[in-house]
Image (cartoon, rainbow, N blue to C red):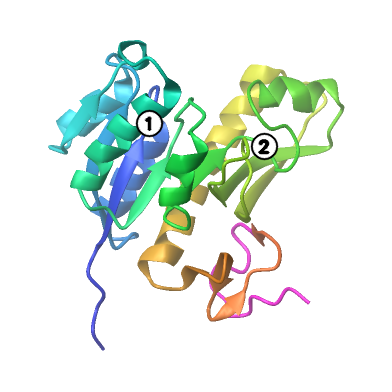
Amino acid sequence: MQIPRPLSIAVLASGRGSNLQALLDACANGRLNARVSLVGSDRADAQALVRAEAAGIAHFSLDPKDFAERAHFDAALFERVAQARPDLVVLAGYMRILAAATVADWQGRMINIHPSLLPLHRGLHTHRKALAQGDAEHGSSVHFVSAELDGGPVIAQARTPVHADDDERSLGQRVLQLEHQLLPSVVALIADGRLEWQQGGPWLDGQPLTRPLDWPHRFQTADASLD
């Protein structure tokens, strides 16, 4: 059987890059048939860039303040991304909204990880919102990127109960631990050719994915119908 070539990934991150590190670790230990070819950021001081340098990965930053319009910044950012010719762009803690034209150019080739059970709690402060609304469970979602904030078809979710003594910090730590497992698992589905963008939506194992996968269940099965 022919082994597919490693999936080439470009990662965009604005902060500490712990999800980037989760991808790098999964590549290094053979869990993920992929390589991170580029890391970009909108912040020169992002820890993600330090992680990239330590791993010997090409990396760069652009300052949004140097551009008159968001669309101009996005165009410059993704020009750099396109030069690396990635198969997939992963937004891993990238904190800027992308222009609709940019998203359209990369439709089906760009995913995002978000710390909530979408469509609940889009945007910022998701742990605070979950606690304030008395949610019984919280978690993380990986979705294909659309022009809508934290929109686009959700691929998979990981869940955790919300405990009575939780605060933002404790709940956020548990969700982050889930993210570090969820994101590489979803990227592995793409790298293995099981998850594809077809006919305007995600397909898993040759069937339309009609609702999000529940991590870690069903990641090893070929049944995507969920009926």
Q: Is residue 215 magenta?
A: yes
Q: Residue furthest bottom?
A: 1
User: Where does the magenta region start and end?
Assistant: 214-227
Residue found 17% across the figure and 37% down from its top: 55
Q: Is residue 186 magenta?
A: no
Residue found 72% across the figure and 37% down from its top: 138
Left or right: where 126 falls relative to 162 = left
**Are there few (<14), some (14-19), or many (20+) residues within 10 Å of tag 2?**
many
Q: Which residue is mark 2?
A: 116
Nearer the observer, 72 or 12: 72
Q: Which residue is mark 1?
A: 74
Report the amino acid beneath label 1.
Asp
Residue found 63% across the figure and 80% down from its top: 223
Characterize the magenta stretch by its predominant secondary structure. Answer: loop
Q: Secondary structure at mark 1?
A: helix
In x, y percent, where is residue 56? Answer: 12, 37
Establish if 1 lies above or below 42: below
In x, y percent, where is residue 211? Answer: 71, 63
Nearer the observer, 98 or 150: 98
Q: Secondary structure at mark 2?
A: loop
Report the amino acid beneath label 2.
Ser
